[in-house]
Amino acid sequence: MSVAMHLISSHLPAIKQLQCFLAVAHELNFRRAAERLNMTQPPLTRQIQSLEALLGQTLFDRNTHDVTLTRAGQALVAKAEAILSALIELKQAAQPAVSRVRIGLTRTLNIERIAPLSQQLAALHARDEIEMPTQTSVQLLQSLARNSLDLVITGEKGAETRDLRYVWLCREPLLAAIPATHAASQQTQVSLAMLADLPLFWFSRSANPPFYDKCERYFSTLNLTLKRIREPDDSLLMLSHIARGRGFALLPQSTCTFNQAGLCYRPLTAGAADSLAIDLYAVIRADEKNTAVLTALQHLSP
């Protein structure tokens, strides 16, 4: 009886706490870890703080530039991975193998806030089966090629290849994140010309070459030059800079959830909105024969 009571104690780490810990331990970056878990940074930070308080140990050393594991954090990584792996095996053993489809999502978007797609995934009961939910589009396609994933949802269509099958799903609009003090904030829609006096926080091409090139093609048609500055790894830091008037950003609508004094979001004017919207695709291997994967793809198709 004493062993049973010990095992059901409420003073044990929660699964979510361990998942959050591992995400930060692997990324060593709170923003990327939050994106990987499809959540924002404040609740992720609270989960880590709660786990540290429960264990009575500091798991990460943090400063303005770096996140590193403490000795206690390093020791916890293998234990947390073993616990979560055992839980995954327990869940998989209770399900028919044919029903398991390994789905990966682009970390650029918050799929939970794209209603039709989120609902379709929920109907597939796929959300609990996503093993690597937040990778860049390039990483997702690499995982698909390595047979680490069965189906991925990515932004934009990559170079044509006979090895992959793309199915268009929907379009995700971009919003302009701008300083609330800027004149364009008084408009219901904004053009890039209205924001040309501000530098644009911009991402690296390596994260998603097709989308980067699509945007650059549109920028090249404008009768203006956009000054670019490197997008920080920490999205909250970038939005804080924007709130203080230091630039603007173009963000997927589904990720525009953070509110701060001095910051606002505005839709783009029709031409820019149409040219810069992200086309989402479901991708599988061209030679895929697994009925469950093909059924999932058909269900997601519009």
Image: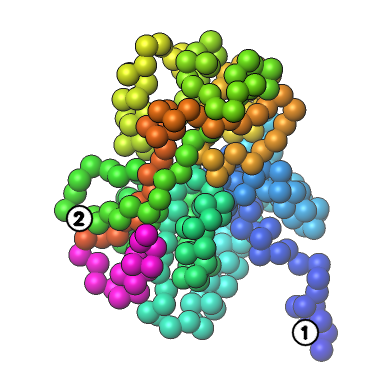
Inspect the image, locate mark 1, and give the three-letter code of the amino acid beneath it. Ala
Q: In this picture, is 98 found above or below 28?
A: below
Q: Nearer the viewer, mark 2 or mark 1?
A: 2
- Front residue of 3/103: it is 103
Q: Which residue is mark 2?
A: 163
Label 2 neighbour load within 10 Å: few <14, some 14-19, many 20+:
few
When the figure is inspected, residue 211 is found, relative to residue 218, above or below; the finding is below
Q: Secondary structure at mark 1?
A: helix
What residue span does the magenta drawing correspond to? Answer: 287-302
User: How far is the residue under mark 2 from the one under mark 1?
Assistant: 52 Å
Q: Which residue is mark 1?
A: 4
Q: Residue at x 48, y 82 (%)?
A: 95
Dominant secondary structure (helix, strand or loop) of the stretch shown in magenta: helix
Give percent across and percent down for residue 19.
61, 58
**Which residue is depicted at the point 24% across and 56% down?**
165
Q: Residue 59: x and y, percent?
A: 70, 48
Name the residue nearer the viewer: 82 or 125. Answer: 125
Magenta-colored stretch includes residue 19: no
Q: Nearer the viewer, residue 146 or 159?
A: 159
Q: Which comes before the other along the chain, label 2 or label 1?
A: 1
Q: Which part of the image, by quadrant, shows the C terminus?
A: bottom left
Number of numbered labels in the structure image: 2
Q: What numbered label is drawn on residue 125? A: none
Q: Residue at x 16, y 53 (%)?
A: 162
